[in-house]
Image (cartoon, rainbow, N blue to C red):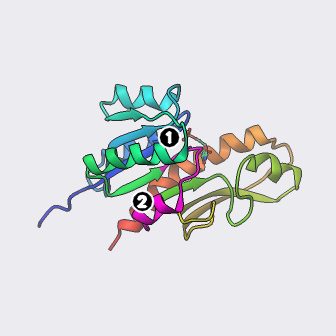
């Protein structure tokens, strides 16, 4: 049987990079469809950079002077490394339509809410304030509108009375770790 080649992937981060960690760990499994060949961070202080370096993943920090220059420099690196899939994982910047069009259905994002509810920032705080019964996370394709692309999968939890935005953040991060890798497997399943 011919072995399938793993899809060359770049993960974009801005902070802790714990989703990156999980995806990387899973990517070591021989049946996982992707491999992480590059990490791009817009933040030189992102903890995820340390993890990438320790694990010999090529990592580049691109200073975010403005969207245009960030994307131009990213594109050069993506092409140079023959990247076919981009995973946004705790990446806190918005990508332009022009950039997204060049990777149509090739950019994934994880968002800590049950989209289409609670797009944007501070989701857990708003969820608690609104006394929602459930929350969760969503992995979706990135399109031109913020947090609005086609949903690949969602994971849901019941919110307990004693939950705060902090406890919810902890619980949902754990769900994210499962959801992101499952979504990656799902899009490459045939
Ligand atoms: C996650 O909750 C992700 O959904 C959100 O930012 C957080 C970052 O987590 N966009 P990490 O950087 O992967 O640890």
User: Could you say where residue 72 lies in the image, as x and y percent from the top left?
Assistant: 41, 47
Q: Does the magenta stretch include residue 89?
A: yes
Packing grade of label 1 (10 A; few <14, some 14-19, many >=20) is many
Packing grade of label 2 (10 A; few <14, some 14-19, many >=20) is many
Asked if residue 103 shows in the view, the reply is no
Asked if residue 106 shows in the view, the reply is yes
Q: Distance between the residues labelled 2 and 1?
A: 17 Å
Q: In this view, does 56 lie above or below 114?
A: above
Residue wearing tag 2? 184
Q: Residue at x 51, y 52 (%)?
A: 178
Tell me the SS state at disc 2: helix
User: Could you say where residue 110 lies in the image, as x and y percent from the top left?
Assistant: 56, 54
Magenta stretch prevailing secondary structure: loop
- Which portion, as a residue range, is magenta? 88-106
User: Could you say where residue 56 lies in the image, as x and y percent from the top left?
Assistant: 30, 30
Q: Residue at x 39, y 61 (%)?
A: 185
Q: In this view, does 126 lie above or below 167?
A: below
Most foreground residue, 26 or 95: 95
Q: Residue at x 26, y 46 (%)?
A: 80
User: Could you say where residue 136 lies in the image, as x and y percent from the top left?
Assistant: 67, 56
Residue wearing tag 1? 13
Q: Residue at x 52, y 29 (%)?
A: 46
Most foreground residue, 99 or 87: 99
């Amino acid at each position: 049987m011919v072995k399938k080649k793993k899809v060359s992937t770049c993960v974009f981060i801005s902070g802790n990079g714990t989703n990156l960690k999980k995806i990387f760990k899973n990517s070591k499994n021989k049946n996982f469809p992707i491999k992480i060949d590059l990490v791009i961070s817009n933040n030189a202080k992102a903890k995820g950079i340390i993890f990438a370096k320790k694990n010999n993943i090529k990592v580049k920090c691109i200073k975010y002077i403005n969207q245009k220059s960030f994307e131009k420099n990213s594109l050069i690196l993506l092409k140079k490394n023959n990247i076919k899939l981009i995973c946004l994982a705790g990446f806190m910047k918005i990508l332009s339509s022009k950039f997204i069009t060049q990777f149509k259905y090739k950019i994934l994002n994880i968002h800590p809410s049950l989209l289409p509810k609670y797009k944007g920032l501070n989701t857990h705080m708003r969820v608690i304030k609104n006394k929602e019964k459930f929350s969760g996370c969503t992995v979706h394709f990135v399109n031109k509108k913020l947090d609005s692309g086609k949903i690949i999968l969602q994971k849901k939890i019941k919110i307990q009375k004693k939950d705060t935005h902090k406890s919810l953040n902890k619980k949902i991060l754990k769900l994210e770790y499962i959801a992101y890798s499952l979504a990656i497997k799902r899009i490459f399943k045939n």
